[in-house]
C-alpha cells in the first residue's frame, strides 16, 4: 500500500514538474515582451524605481544617500527620483544591493527590474502551489491568472516597487522552514528588514511563531541575517543606522491616517490623533494577542504555510505605515485559502473565491478614488486574515504528501 502510494505520488510529482516547466516556458517570453513594452512607453525616471536606482548609483559613486544636498544634486543631474523624499527612505544595504544594476542606464535597469518582478511573482506562486500536490492544472491557471490581476499587479510593477522580491523571499523562507532548514529559512526571511515598514511586523510575528515552535535555529538565522545586513551597510558608512533613522523619523507623522492599516482606519474613524493613537495601540495589541494564541494553543496544528498565511495579513494590519502595493504580499494568504477552498469545495468554488478576492481589491481601489484615500483597502487584509485563520485551524495536512513527493 505504501509502495503504491509512493509510486502514485512520484508520478504526480513528475506531472507537476512538467506543468511548472510549461508555465515558465510559456510565460517567460510573455513577461519579457511586457517588460520591453512597458519600458518603451514609460519613463523610468518618473517611477518609484528611479529612487532605488539613484540610491545604487550614489553608492557606486561614494555619495551619501542620507545627505539632502547630495540626494537633490544627483536627482537634478540625473533627472531621477523626482517625486521622492529629500533623502533615500530605505536602509543602506538595499541601496548597496541596487548598486548591482545601477551601473546600467536607468531605463535598461528598469526593464530588467520589471522582468524580474514578473518572474519573482510567478516563482512565488509555484512555490506555494507546491504545498498542494493533488492540484489540477485548472487550479494553477486560476491562481496565476488571479494573482496577476490582483490590485492590479501590472500597475504596481510599472512603478518598479520593491515588494516582489519580498514576496519571493517570503515564499522561499516558507519552503525552507517546511523542509526543516530552519537556520537558512531564518537567514532568508531576515532580508525582509530591507523594507522596515512591513518587514518589522512580519519578522516580529515570524519570530513569535518560531519561538512557539522552539525553533532556535530559525531565530538564530534571523539574527545572523540582520547582523550581516548591518555589517554590509557599515562597510559603506559606519554611521548609516543613525543617519537612516534621522531621515525617516518623520514618515509616520507625515503619512499617519493615509494607509490601509489598523492605524489608518482608527484615524479615519476618530480623527483625533491622541485618541486614535491610543486605540490604534489597543487594536495592534489585540491582533498580536490573537496571533500569539494561535501560535501557542494551536502549535501542534499550525504548520509553516498556515502560520504564514495568517502572519502576512496580520503584519500588514500592524504596520505603522504601508502602501497599497505592499498588499501583493497577500499572495501568500490568497494561495493558501485557494488551496483550502479547492480541496474542500472543488475547483469551481475556488474560481469563485478568486473572483471575489480580485473583485474586492478592485472595488476598494475604486472606492479610494472616490473618497481620496486608500484606507478602505484594509478590508483586503482583514478578510484574508479571517479566512486564513479559519482555514489554519482546519487545515489540510500538507506535510505528509510533500514528504512522500520528496
Image (tube, grey):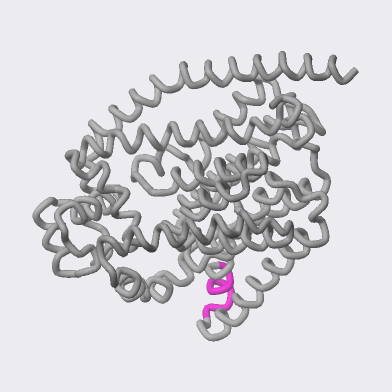
In the displayed structure image, the side of residue 369 where residue 211 appears, left or right: right
- Is 280 inside the magenta-drawn segment? no
Q: In screen coordinates, is 56 left or right of 279?
A: left
Residue 93 vs residue 42, the one in the foreground? 93
Establish if 191 lies above or below 402: below
Question: Which is more toward the observer, 204 or 233?
Answer: 233
297 or 44, nearer to the observer: 297
Question: Residue at (35%, 27%) from the top-left corner?
Answer: 34
- Residue 309 % position (x, y): 66, 48
Would you place residue 88 above or below residue 163 in this image?
A: below
Magenta-tinted stretch: 265-271
The structure residue drawn at horizontal position 77% and vertical position 46%, both measured from the top left corner, is 391
Q: Is residue 270 magenta?
A: yes
Q: Which quadrant, please, contains the N terminus?
A: top right
The relative height of residue 130 versus residue 281 in the rendered view (above or below) is above
Task: Name the residue nearer the viewer: 175 or 116.
Answer: 175
Work out whether residue 306 can be spotted: yes
Residue 149, percent across and down? 51, 35
Please identify the residue farthest to the bottom as the structure is shown: 274
Residue 394 image offset from top left, x and y in percent? 83, 45
Find residue 85 and report its horizontal and vertical position in percent. 27, 64
Q: Can see residue 370?
A: no
Which residue is located at x 33 percent, y 75 percent? Answer: 242
Left or right of 127? Residue 76 is left
Q: Which residue is pictured at 38% across the width and 35% down the height?
A: 116
Query: Which quadrant is home to the C terminus?
Result: top right
Amino acid at each position: 500500500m505504501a509502495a503504491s502510494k509512493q509510486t502514485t505520488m512520484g508520478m504526480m510529482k513528475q506531472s507537476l514538474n512538467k506543468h511548472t516547466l510549461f508555465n515558465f516556458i510559456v510565460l517567460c517570453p510573455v513577461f519579457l515582451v511586457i517588460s520591453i513594452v512597458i519600458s518603451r512607453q514609460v519613463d523610468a525616471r518618473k517611477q518609484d524605481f528611479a529612487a532605488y536606482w539613484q540610491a545604487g548609483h550614489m553608492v557606486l559613486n561614494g555619495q551619501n544617500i542620507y545627505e539632502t544636498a547630495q540626494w537633490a544634486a544627483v536627482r537634478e543631474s540625473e533627472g531621477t527620483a523626482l517625486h521622492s523624499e529629500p533623502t533615500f527612505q530605505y536602509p543602506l544595504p538595499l541601496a548597496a544591493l541596487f548598486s548591482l544594476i545601477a551601473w546600467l542606464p536607468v531605463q535598461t535597469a528598469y526593464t530588467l527590474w520589471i522582468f524580474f518582478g514578473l518572474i519573482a511573482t510567478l516563482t512565488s506562486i509555484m512555490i506555494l502551489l507546491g504545498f498542494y500536490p493533488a492540484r489540477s492544472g485548472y487550479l494553477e491557471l486560476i491562481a496565476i491568472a488571479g494573482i496577476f490581476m490582483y490590485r492590479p499587479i501590472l500597475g504596481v510593477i510599472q512603478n518598479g516597487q520593491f515588494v516582489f522580491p519580498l514576496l519571493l523571499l517570503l515564499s522561499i523562507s516558507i519552503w525552507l522552514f517546511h523542509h526543516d532548514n530552519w537556520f537558512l529559512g531564518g537567514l532568508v526571511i531576515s532580508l525582509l528588514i530591507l523594507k522596515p515598514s512591513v518587514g518589522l511586523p512580519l519578522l516580529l510575528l515570524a519570530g513569535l511563531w518560531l519561538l512557539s515552535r522552539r525553533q532556535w535555529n530559525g531565530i538564530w538565522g534571523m539574527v545572523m541575517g540582520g547582523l550581516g545586513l548591518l555589517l554590509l551597510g557599515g562597510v559603506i558608512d559606519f554611521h548609516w543606522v543613525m543617519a537612516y533613522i534621522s531621515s525617516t523619523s518623520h514618515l509616520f507623522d507625515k503619512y499617519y491616517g493615509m494607509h490601509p492599516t489598523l492605524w489608518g482606519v482608527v484615524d479615519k474613524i476618530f480623527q483625533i490623533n491622541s485618541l486614535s493613537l491610543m486605540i490604534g495601540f489597543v487594536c495592534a495589541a489585540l491582533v498580536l494577542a490573537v496571533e500569539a494564541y494561535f501560535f501557542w494553543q494551536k502549535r501542534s496544528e499550525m504548520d509553516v504555510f498556515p502560520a504564514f498565511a495568517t502572519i502576512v495579513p496580520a503584519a500588514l494590519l500592524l504596520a505603522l505605515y504601508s502602501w497599497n502595493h505592499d498588499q501583493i504580499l497577500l499572495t501568500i494568504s490568497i494561495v493558501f485559502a485557494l488551496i483550502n477552498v479547492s480541496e474542500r469545495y472543488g475547483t469551481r468554488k475556488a474560481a469563485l473565491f478568486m473572483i471575489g478576492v480580485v473583485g474586492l481589491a478592485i472595488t476598494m481601489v475604486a472606492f479610494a478614488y472616490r473618497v481620496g484615500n486608500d484606507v478602505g483597502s484594509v478590508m483586503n487584509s482583514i478578510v484574508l486574515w479571517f479566512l486564513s485563520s479559519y482555514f489554519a485551524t482546519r487545515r489540510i495536512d500538507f506535510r505528509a504528501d510533500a514528504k512522500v513527493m520528496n
